[in-house]
Image (cartoon, rainbow, N blue to C red):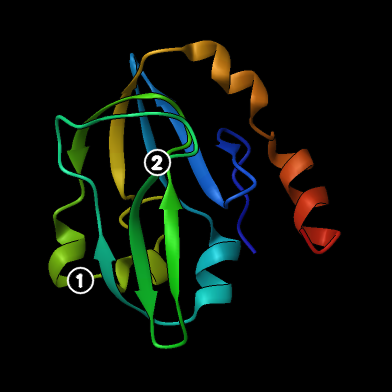
Amino acid sequence: MNLPGDVWFTPEHFWVKKENDRYLCGITDHAQQELGEVVFVEMPRPGVTVKKSERIGDVESIKTISNLYAPLSGQIVEVNTLLEKKPELINQSPYEKGWILRMQASDESELSGLLDTAGYQEFISHGE
């Protein structure tokens, strides 16, 4: 399982990576493995303002549908439109080509509530 050291994680299996003044986000390698083959992604619209932990979309696999929750409060500034035609990018490259959204955080103090790599590893090893 791939767990990069330069991202934060949510208990809902979303990863967050700071890029200048924005945050790149997607589902973790662990989550995509649990889901199996991803066949559809419902993403929020750019320009929408969300609150941390608010439902913002779904990932559908051949096994199940899983809700997506905002990792931080703020505004969605971009979504990965490649996922509309190639949702399998989430399985193939969850931290690179399979990213889901970019957002502008409205309260960066919320980052303190996220898990670092070691914390997320411990979280998933204890069966969530």
The amino acid type found where label 2 is placed reads Cys
Q: Is residue 1 left or right of residue 73?
A: right
Q: Position of residue 76 (x, y in %)?
A: 24, 32
Q: Is residue 31 left or right of residue 114?
A: left
Name, please, the residue furthest toward the bottom.
Answer: 62
Q: Residue at x 19, y 32 (%)?
A: 48
In the rendered view, tell whether residue 92 sits above or below residue 104: below
* Mark 1 neighbour density, 10 Å: few (under 14) some (14–19) many (20 or more): some
Of the residues under marks 2 and 1, which one precedes in the sequence?
Answer: 2
Q: Position of residue 42 (x, y in %)?
A: 25, 61
Q: Where is mark 1, residue-wise? A: 86
When asked about the image quadrant of residue 62, the answer is bottom left
In the rendered view, tell whether residue 23 sits above or below residue 42: above
Q: Quadrant of the C terminus?
A: bottom right
Q: Residue at x 47, y 87 (%)?
A: 63
Q: Position of residue 113 (x, y in %)?
A: 66, 25
In the rendered view, tell whether residue 64 sits above or below residue 13: below
- Marks 2 and 1 sit apart, C-alpha to C-alpha, by 17 Å
Callout 1: helix, strand or loop? loop
When asked about the image quadrant of residue 117, the answer is top right
Q: Residue at x 81, y 64 (%)?
A: 127
* Mark 2 neighbour density, 10 Å: few (under 14) some (14–19) many (20 or more): many
In the rendered view, tell whether residue 127 sits above or below residue 121: below
Q: Quadrant of the N terminus?
A: bottom right
The amino acid type found where label 1 is placed reads Lys
Residue nearer the viewer, 67 or 115: 67
Q: Where is mark 2, residue-wise? A: 25
Callout 2: helix, strand or loop? strand
Q: Is residue 125 left or right of residue 112?
A: right
